[in-house]
Image (tube, rainbow, N blue to C red):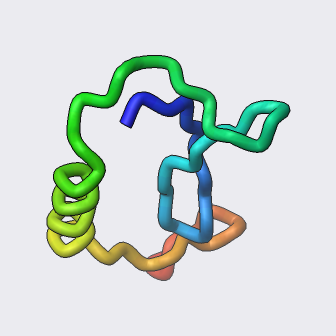
Amino acid sequence: MGYRVEEDRNGGVRRSKIVLGNDAKPIRVADPIFAEEQFQSLQDALDQRGKKQPTRRPDGATKFL
């Protein structure tokens, strides 16, 4: 959508988080490629196809150890 984003980690899930400017509005760095409806439709399809991975252990060890 042309907004500046940063990585947002929540457990084992990584998502993009929109960066807000001093005026509390999203920072636009480029023109959007998709319309809002198209973008949301693509995001929904990607969410359905995404792999559900177990959350990562804080110490990095696997269950096999």
**Residue visible at 19% across and 74% down in the picture:** 48
Q: Is residue 42 found left or right of 21 in the rendered image?
A: left
> How many numbered marks does the figure carry?
0
Nearer the observer, 4 or 8: 4
Residue 24: quadrant of the picture: top right
**Residue visible at 70% across and 66% down in the picture:** 59
Nearer the observer, 42 or 28: 28
- Give the answer, above or below, for where 12 lies relative to 15: below
Residue 35: quadrant of the picture: top left
- Give the answer, above or below, for where 33 lies relative to 38: above
Q: Residue furthest right?
A: 22
**Residue visible at 69% across and 68% down in the picture:** 58
Q: Position of residue 1 (x, y in %)?
A: 37, 37
Q: Is residue 27 found left or right of 64 in the rendered image?
A: right
Nearer the observer, 27 or 48: 27
Q: Position of residue 3 (x, y in %)?
A: 50, 32
**Residue visible at 36% across and 74% down in the picture:** 53
Q: Position of residue 17 (x, y in %)?
A: 57, 49
Q: Position of residue 60 (x, y in %)?
A: 61, 62
Q: Is residue 6 found left or right of 13 in the rendered image?
A: right
Nearer the observer, 41 or 12: 41
- Give the answer, above or below, for where 15 lies relative to 62: above
